[in-house]
Image (spheres, rainbow, N blue to C red):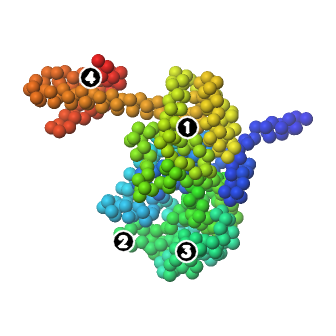
């Protein structure tokens, strides 16, 4: 009898997360290989420029998955790996065009990325490897693939024999003939087959390179994630995530080379892909002047919290259309929620929010629950539940305060500029000096040159005193 009760309790407390698995094309129960060691890998950015909205969507989506897994399995039982691709021809070209070192591009871009994703209130992953840190592991994997005849060396390149892996196409659902007809295959004289893809390529003296059995060169893109995932998560792990544009060829190639390199392992059990993002119904493109980086939006007074809300208010497997109406709606909703939670302590996360996320990360249903909680005036539960999905965080309140401070500073700057102009015309500086002294007392450094005036808050900054300068 005791044994039966224990079994029933175990079943009742078992997490009930369902995930749409891209490889089976159906929703499945999530059953981790080891509940004490739940592992997920997300394909991160290629670091050559500012992160755009399309880069932000998978970060926010799978950050929410990370939060859910922590809630269900415990923080110490979840490992989240998101890589930085810092070996890429786009990086090389940008560094060359700017006349700076490649490392300067990658270091700066990674700093930008982390700053921008911080504004979106995304948690920092457990591990954030750079591809350059794992080149030796990539070389080892490539050597193994050559030994098993899954790869070959030709004209300075090492290529993977796609037809050597019988299940190639299982993720994207494409036949080999469809792939060739699709024209996403590079035809090159050093290939045995147009489908074969590069694992290693030669580097000239002006490009990054590493010594290898095949001469000085650098890895192809696809081998990077396979090697990093194997090293950091093992040959078999739970979830692999990324944008739907990565299904083919990137993720398809990852599966093929990983399964051939480690035939006794399963690589990723579940594959999750977020759909693409549009702006006003059109593909985001610089040529259409509808291309937005996260930083662009932040500079236009669209907070990271607003961006996160919009990214979560469409299901991750559906295309997301970014519009001005969505921005305004998000601002109004968050302002309304925040106005009622400013002086409230967070309560307990509403289980309905967790249940919504457990159903294939249904963030739209989770936000719907937040609306219901707000209408019920249960503001402590609203605050806890919103914070669970990365909204109404304390940093968001600070962002709003900082934005208000900037507006006040702009007003003070106008007043000071007008007083200075009057002083110059009348040759009487008493009024401008008095106002300048008052500004300094609020913890603002006043930097005046011949053509400019700058107001820079210092460690003694007093925002209440600052506001008193314009409330006269």
Q: Nearer the viewer, residue 415 or 381?
A: 415
Callout count: 4
SS at circle 2? loop
Q: According to the image, label 4 marks what residue?
A: 441
* Badge 4 element: helix
What's the distance in space between the residues labelled 1 and 2, CA to CA? 46 Å
State yes or no: discs 3 and 1 in contact (Cβ < 8 Å): no
Q: CA distance from mark 3 to mark 1?
A: 43 Å
> Mark 1 or mark 4, which has the lower sequence index?
1
The tag earlier along the polypeptide, 2 or 3, is 3
- The residues bearing labels 4 and 3 have C-alpha atoms spaced at a distance of 67 Å
Q: CA distance from mark 1 to mark 4?
A: 37 Å
- Name the element at disc 3: strand
**Of the numbered discs in the image, which one, if any, rests on residue 205?**
2
Residue 392 image position (x, y, % from top left): 53, 32
The local secondary structure at tag 1 comes to: loop
Q: Earlier in the sequence, mark 4 or mark 3?
A: 3
Q: Is residue 232 left or right of residue 283?
A: right
Residue at figure coordinates x 40%, y 66% from the top left: 208
* Residue that numbered label 1 is attached to: 390
Pair 1/2: label in front: 1
State the image coordinates of residue 84 (x, y, percent, origin top left): 49, 55
State which tag comes first along the sequence, 3 or 1.
3
Left or right: 439 in relation to 277? left
Which one is closest to the eye, mark 2 or mark 4? Answer: 4
Q: Quadrant of the N terminus?
A: top right
Which residue is label 3 attached to? 159
How crowded pointer 2 is (Cα within 10 Å; few <14, some 14-19, many 20+) is rated as few
């Amino acid at each position: 009898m005791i044994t039966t009760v224990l079994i029933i309790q175990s079943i009742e407390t078992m997490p009930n997360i369902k995930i749409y698995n891209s490889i089976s094309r159906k929703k499945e129960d999530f059953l981790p290989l080891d509940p004490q060691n739940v592992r997920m890998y997300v394909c991160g950015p290629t670091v050559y420029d500012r992160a755009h909205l399309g880069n932000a969507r998978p970060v926010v989506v799978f950050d929410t998955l990370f939060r859910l897994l922590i809630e269900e399995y415990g923080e110490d039982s979840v490992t989240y790996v998101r890589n930085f691709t810092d070996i890429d021809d786009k990086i090389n070209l940008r560094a060359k065009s700017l006349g700076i070192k490649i490392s300067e591009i990658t270091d700066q871009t990674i700093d930008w990325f982390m700053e921008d994703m911080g504004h979106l209130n995304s948690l920092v992953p457990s591990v954030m490897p750079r591809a350059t840190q794992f080149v030796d592991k990539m070389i080892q994997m490539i050597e193994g693939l050559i030994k098993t005849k899954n790869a070959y060396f030709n004209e300075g390149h090492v290529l993977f024999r796609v037809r050597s892996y019988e299940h190639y196409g299982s993720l994207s659902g494409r036949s080999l003939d469809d792939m060739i007809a699709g024209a996403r295959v590079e035809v090159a004289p050093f290939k045995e087959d147009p489908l074969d893809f590069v694992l290693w390529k030669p580097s000239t003296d002006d490009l990054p390179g590493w010594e290898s059995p095949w001469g000085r060169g650098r890895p192809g893109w696809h081998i990077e994630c396979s090697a990093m995932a194997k090293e950091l998560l093992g040959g078999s792990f739970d979830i692999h995530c990324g944008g739907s544009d990565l299904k083919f060829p990137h993720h398809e190639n990852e599966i093929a080379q990983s399964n051939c390199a480690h035939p006794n392992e399963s690589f990723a059990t579940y594959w999750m892909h977020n759909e693409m993002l549009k702006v006003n119904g059109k593909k985001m493109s610089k040529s259409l002047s509808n291309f937005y980086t996260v930083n662009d939006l932040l500079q236009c007074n669209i907070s990271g919290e607003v961006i996160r809300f919009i990214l979560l208010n469409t299901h991750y497997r559906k295309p997301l259309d970014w519009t001005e109406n969505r921005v305004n709606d998000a601002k109004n909703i968050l302002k309304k929620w925040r106005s009622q939670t400013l002086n409230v302590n967070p309560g307990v996360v509403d289980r309905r929010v967790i249940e919504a996320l457990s159903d294939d990360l249904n963030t739209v249903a989770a936000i719907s629950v937040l609306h219901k909680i707000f209408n019920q005036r249960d503001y402590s539960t609203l605050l806890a539940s919103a914070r669970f999905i990365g909204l109404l965080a304390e940093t968001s309140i600070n962002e709003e305060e900082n934005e208000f401070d900037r507006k006040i500073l702009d007003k003070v700057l106008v007043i000071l500029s007008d007083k200075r102009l009057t002083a110059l015309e009348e040759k009487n500086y008493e009024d401008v000096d008095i106002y300048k002294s008052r500004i300094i007392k609020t913890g603002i450094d006043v930097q005046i040159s011949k053509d400019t005036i700058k107001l820079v808050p210092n460690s003694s900054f007093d925002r209440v005193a600052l506001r008193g300068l314009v409330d006269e």
